Image (cartoon, grey):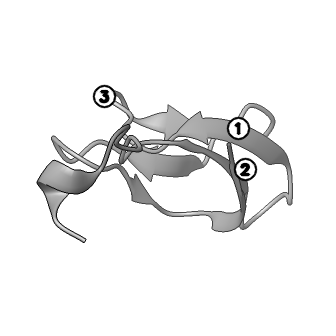
Amino acid sequence: MKKENILIPKPKSNFLSVQCTSCKEKQVIFSHATIDINCKSCGNPIAKKTGGRASVLGEILTTLD
């Protein structure tokens, strides 16, 4: 299907449920984050900004709609 034929295009960004690798704390982040995101409980980095889609360092559990 061509791009012109899609009536309502879906966005390429979404929210992600990410689990910290060290303390197993769950956190919801935006896939195209513009700042570095750290874990709320232990402070380890979960995602780093890259200018586009964020580089997720934790484990992605689900994609939220």
Q: CA distance from mark 3 to mark 2?
A: 17 Å
Rendered image: mark on residue 17? 2
Q: Is residue 15 left or right of residue 40?
A: left
**Could you tell whether 53 is left or right of 13 in the image?**
left
* Residue 44 locus on image (x, y percent): 60, 48
From what the image shows, is residue 42 above or below residue 61? above
* Pointer 3 or 2: first along the chain: 2
Q: How many angstroms separate mark 1 from mark 3 (CA)?
A: 15 Å
| Residue name at image x 16 percent, y 65 percent | 2
The location of residue 15, given as percent across then percent down, is: 59, 40
Residue denoted by label 1: 28
Is 14 left, or right, of 12 in this rendering?
right
**Contact (Cβ within 8 Å) of mark 1 with mark 3:** no
At 39% from the left and 34% from the top, the residue drawn is: 33
Name the residue that disc number 3 marks. Answer: 34
Would you say the residues marked 1 and 2 are in contact, meaning their CB atoms lie under 8 Å apart?
yes
Residue 13 percent coordinates (x, y): 41, 42
